[in-house]
Image (spheres, rainbow, N blue to C red):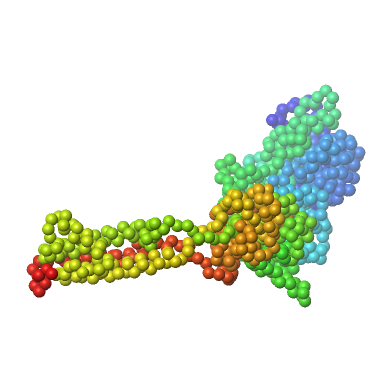
């Protein structure tokens, strides 16, 4: 690390430094004062042996004038190094002169191209690169879920690279750059109004302003935008570093017009004692030199100019090599490494390090509030006092920053877009040859030359568009051709997208990208139904389930036990040995299901239990008879074909609807002979041949099969075996910015249940041409009689409890004391 006291110089020497600045701009005024302060601070008190002589020229912000100034500094003033200028347009001309004369040029232009450093080896970028600010802006936009951005920039070469950097950063967070408006450096109000009007009539409401140096243009831009009511609710304005760093210098009327604007600016530690001393002296001297300026705070441009002069001075203190000369000074500059006001100053590959931390500000009132910091590789943090090491970082601006004041002061966050009636719609092709009109049905109006489209795919697309976080105008165009040709029209740029029952297959992927499939991705086969073979030996048990048979057995035993318990003391038939009593009780339990002739009851309690018992027996026997008759008379059906192998073993013919990829799949994957495969253009013809036995099965996508089975509900079904395919999806142009959003919207439609509702409505609209057979289990279970069983068991239990409680003399009827 070089310090100002490292090299001892015995004889005082003078080193001439040239500077090229725009003295009419605020940046130029700050840079002049900062460089003068740096030269004086370096000489006092430790470096009396080296005198820095500054020669400052005015470029007036013109590249040609900057080149003439450089030539004058070299020839007349005989400077040994040049500091400045700020713009790349000026730097590119000055660098050629500096390299020709082997004079180091410390430029303040941001993001010097790599080729420029190779072409002009004496060019050094003295200002830190601000390219990371574009990532910060992209992170802000992503935090608020905005998906489209327009850029307003100057019509200069350096802005082109900045816009490309922003476009790359936006693309990484799935944000689309929809418009780029370039303004001449000296735009008049009428031109500004015209350019802003072109943005106002479009749906995007998020504007990024990148104006590199012209504060006059920036002030005029925002005043015009305010007059055009473009700084009100639903608008979002974001400014980049060069503009935001000079906000404190703007006229109060401009600040008043910028209420709610978000900005990013380079951040460095302003709490260090050295910077505090510099800032205090700078404000005092700047107010004296420029009393017309209302704000005297130094910007980052002044700090970088101060550090650039220090870098030159410290390099001069390094010992020279044997050869000496200007190349020696260049080499020593490239070895420079010290702590400046902005941070560590070190030139790697002829450029200063990158600035990785930016402050996010919000224009409010007469100034602005700091919302927080964004650091490249970390994210957002609340810390604004320079203690980055202890900061907690978040990926979203919403997580750490307080309430943001947006233009117009709405109580909600802007959504970033608004419907625009004159926005150019995207062109969507829809097929006219859809086999199933339930998916896409087109009606042409030859008088007005318009079309109206309806169907499942159309309704689904419209539902998805409603879920988009931005306004997407679109226009349907009918296409009379094959589905392959429809997808190829997207590749040929005749359509932006295609909507319909478009299968996602390999041969279409080179021409378009697809959304996730919105249907089941299966190829199925429709086959006839045939009578099911059943084992008739145990057919008599089918009316009831096993659990119901068991429950009937238990309940009969229980009811027989209750009657036997009550009547046994007064009926000789219920007495005798244990074996005799058990036999009588079992006989009593089951003969009641059919008749009751063998016993006259003596107790009212047993009569009560028996009446309910007989009612239950009557209901069960009648139900059993009816269900058994149904089983014997109604046929039970099953698929005639279970799998592909059975078709191939029979050497039967098969059919498919006119879809190219299905024929290829049947022949190449399932290995059907082409002679056995028949193509159909009409679903009705395929179902007729299937019914007549001409073909054994019809292959198609499952969504189509559901429609056919809803229409032909008798005699046909879908075989259990199915095959995975791509399914139906919407096609978009390769790299289309709309694709990820439409895919996400389809997921939302699915999760909300709207997709299921659309499918149910489509299936329900089909009129069945026959009577289908029920497929439910004919066996009745215990749930069909549970209330009757509870009533019967409850009555018997009540009778038994009453019998046990009351005395036997009170329960018996004296007139019924003789057993018949």
> Which residue shows up at 16% across the image and 58% down it?
581
Q: Position of residue 731 (x, y in %)?
A: 70, 57
Q: Is residue 271 left or right of residue 351?
A: left
Q: Quadrant of residue 656?
A: bottom right
Q: Nearer the viewer, residue 530 or 71?
A: 530
Q: Nearer the viewer, residue 295 or 628?
A: 628
Q: Position of residue 751 (x, y in %)?
A: 55, 59
Q: Is residue 743 left or right of residue 39?
A: left
User: Is residue 303 visible in this depiction of the protein?
Assistant: yes
Q: Position of residue 708 (x, y in %)?
A: 60, 64
User: Is residue 371 visible in this depiction of the protein?
Assistant: no
> Which residue shows up at 33% across the image and 65% down it?
785
> Which residue shows up at 74% across the image and 46% down it?
301
When the figure is inspected, residue 117 is found, relative to residue 227, above or below; the finding is above
What quarter of the picture does the N terminus occupy?
Answer: top right
The residue lying furthest to the front in this view is: 537
Q: Position of residue 792 (x, y in %)?
A: 26, 66
């Amino acid at each position: 690390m070089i310090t100002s006291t490292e090299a001892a110089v015995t004889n005082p020497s003078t080193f001439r430094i040239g500077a090229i600045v725009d003295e009419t701009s605020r940046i130029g005024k700050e840079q002049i004062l900062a460089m003068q302060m740096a030269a004086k601070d370096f000489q006092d008190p430790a470096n009396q042996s080296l005198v820095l002589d500054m020669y400052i020229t005015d470029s007036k912000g013109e590249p040609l004038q900057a080149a003439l100034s450089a030539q004058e500094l070299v020839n007349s003033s005989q400077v040994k190094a040049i500091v400045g200028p700020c713009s790349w347009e000026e730097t590119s001309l000055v660098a050629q002169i500096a390299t020709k004369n082997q004079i180091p040029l410390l430029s303040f232009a941001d993001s010097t191209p790599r080729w420029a450093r190779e072409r002009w080896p004496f060019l050094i970028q003295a200002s830190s690169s601000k390219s990371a600010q574009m990532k910060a802006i992209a992170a802000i936009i992503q935090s608020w879920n905005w998906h489209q951005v327009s850029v307003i920039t100057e019509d200069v070469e350096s802005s082109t690279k900045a816009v490309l950097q922003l476009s790359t950063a936006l693309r990484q967070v799935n944000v689309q750059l929809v418009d780029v408006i370039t303004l001449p450096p000296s735009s008049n109000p009428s031109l500004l109004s015209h350019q802003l009007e072109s943005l106002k009539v479009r749906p995007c409401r998020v504007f990024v302003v990148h104006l590199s140096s012209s504060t006059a243009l920036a002030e005029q831009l925002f005043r015009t935008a305010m007059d055009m009511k473009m700084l009100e609710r639903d608008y979002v304005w974001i400014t980049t570093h060069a503009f935001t760093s000079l906000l404190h210098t703007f006229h109060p009327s401009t600040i008043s017009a910028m209420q709610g604007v978000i900005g990013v600016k380079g951040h460095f530690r302003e709490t260090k004692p050295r910077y505090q001393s510099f800032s205090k002296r700078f404000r005092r001297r700047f107010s004296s030199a420029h009393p017309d300026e209302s704000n005297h705070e130094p910007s980052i441009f002044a700090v970088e100019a101060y550090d650039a002069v220090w870098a030159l001075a410290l390099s001069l203190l390094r010992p020279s090599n044997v050869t000496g000369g200007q190349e020696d000074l260049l080499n020593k500059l490239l070895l420079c490494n010290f702590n400046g006001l902005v941070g560590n100053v070190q030139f790697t590959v002829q450029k200063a390090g990158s600035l990785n931390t930016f402050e996010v500000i919000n224009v409010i009132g007469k100034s602005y509030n700091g919302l927080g910091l964004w650091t490249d590789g970390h994210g957002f943090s609340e810390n604004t006092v320079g203690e980055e090491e202890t900061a907690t970082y978040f990926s979203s601006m919403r997580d750490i920053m307080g309430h943001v004041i947006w233009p117009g002061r709405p109580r909600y966050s802007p959504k970033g877009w608004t419907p625009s009636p004159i926005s150019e719609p995207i062109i969507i092709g829809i097929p006219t040859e859809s086999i199933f009109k339930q998916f896409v049905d087109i009606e042409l109006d030859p008088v007005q030359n318009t079309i109206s489209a309806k169907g499942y795919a159309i309704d689904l697309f419209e539902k998805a568009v409603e879920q988009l976080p931005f306004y997407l105008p679109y226009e349907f165009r009918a296409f009379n051709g094959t589905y392959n040709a429809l997808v190829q029209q997207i590749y040929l740029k005749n359509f932006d997208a295609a909507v319909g029952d478009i299968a996602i297959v390999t041969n279409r992927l080179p021409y378009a990208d697809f959304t996730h499939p919105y249907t089941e991705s299966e190829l199925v086969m429709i086959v006839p139904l045939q009578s099911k073979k059943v084992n008739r030996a145990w057919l008599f048990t089918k009316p009831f389930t096993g659990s119901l048979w068991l429950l009937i057995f238990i309940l009969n035993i229980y009811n027989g036990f209750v009657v036997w318990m009550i009547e046994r003391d007064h009926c000789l038939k219920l007495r005798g040995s244990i074996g005799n009593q058990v036999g009588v009780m079992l006989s009593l339990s089951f003969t009641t299901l059919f008749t009751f002739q063998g016993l006259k009851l003596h107790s009212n309690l047993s009569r009560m239990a028996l009446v309910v018992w007989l009612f239950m027996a009557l209901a069960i026997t009648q139900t059993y008879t009816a269900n058994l008759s149904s089983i014997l008379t109604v046929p039970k059906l099953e698929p005639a074909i279970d799998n592909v192998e059975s078709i191939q073993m029979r050497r039967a013919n098969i059919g498919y609807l006119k879809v190219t990829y299905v024929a290829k799949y049947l022949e190449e994957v399932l290995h059907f002979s082409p002679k056995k495969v028949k193509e159909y253009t009409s679903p009705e013809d395929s179902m007729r041949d299937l019914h007549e036995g001409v073909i054994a099965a019809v292959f198609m996508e499952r969504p189509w099969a559901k429609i056919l089975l809803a229409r032909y509900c008798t005699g046909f079904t879908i075989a259990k075996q199915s095959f995975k395919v791509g399914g139906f999806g919407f096609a978009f142009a390769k790299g289309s910015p709309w694709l990820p959003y439409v895919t996400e919207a389809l997921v939302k439609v699915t999760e909300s249940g709207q997709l299921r509702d659309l499918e149910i409505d489509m299936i329900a609209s089909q009129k069945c041409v026959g009577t289908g057979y029920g497929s439910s289990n004919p066996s009745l279970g215990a749930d069909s009689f549970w209330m009757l069983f509870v009533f019967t068991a409850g009555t018997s239990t009540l009778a038994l409890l009453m019998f046990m409680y009351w005395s036997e003399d009170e329960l018996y009827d004296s007139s019924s004391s003789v057993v018949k």
